[in-house]
Image: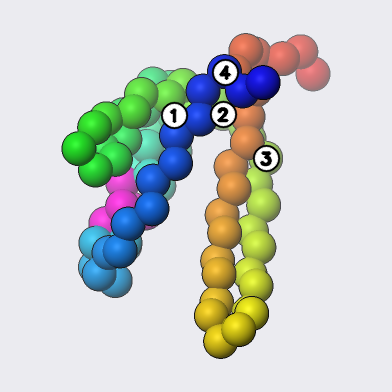
Amino acid sequence: MKDLEFTQKRTLSRTEAAAQLEALAAALRRGGQAELELGPGRLTLRIPDELSTEIEVELEDGKIELEVELTWHTEPTDR
């Protein structure tokens, strides 16, 4: 069972999508506690110095799907 799940699907202009990605990139650069504006609300996340990434591109039925996934542990881990 998941502790928390948030999903948001919206139609954005290319400029709005870029602004959302830029805000996420700025939060990743800062690290620590990051606040993300997500539509009507705000989500606060702790972002560590290292995380795992996955980028997936699919072309199906005349549509391109670009998925960017960032994953990290909620508690610090020993290396």
Of label 2 and label 1, which has the lower sequence position?
A: 1
In this image, 74 relative to 23: left or right? right
* Residue of label 2: 49
* Residue of label 4: 3
Which residue lies most toward the left here?
40
| Badge 3 vs badge 1, beta-carbon distance below 8 Å | no
* Residue of label 1: 31
Query: Gap between marks 3 and 4, in whole Å?
Result: 20 Å
**What segment carries the magenta color?**
19-23
Of label 3 and label 1, which has the lower sequence position?
A: 1
Q: Nearer the viewer, mark 3 or mark 2?
A: 3
Of label 2 and label 4, which has the lower sequence position?
A: 4
Residue 17, which numbered label? Answer: none
Query: Gap between marks 3 and 2, in whole Å?
Result: 11 Å
Q: Residues within 10 Å of mark 1 (few under 14, many from 20)?
A: some
Residue at left 57%, top 59%?
67
Q: Amino acid at mark 4?
A: Asp
- Say which quadrant the C terminus sits in: top right
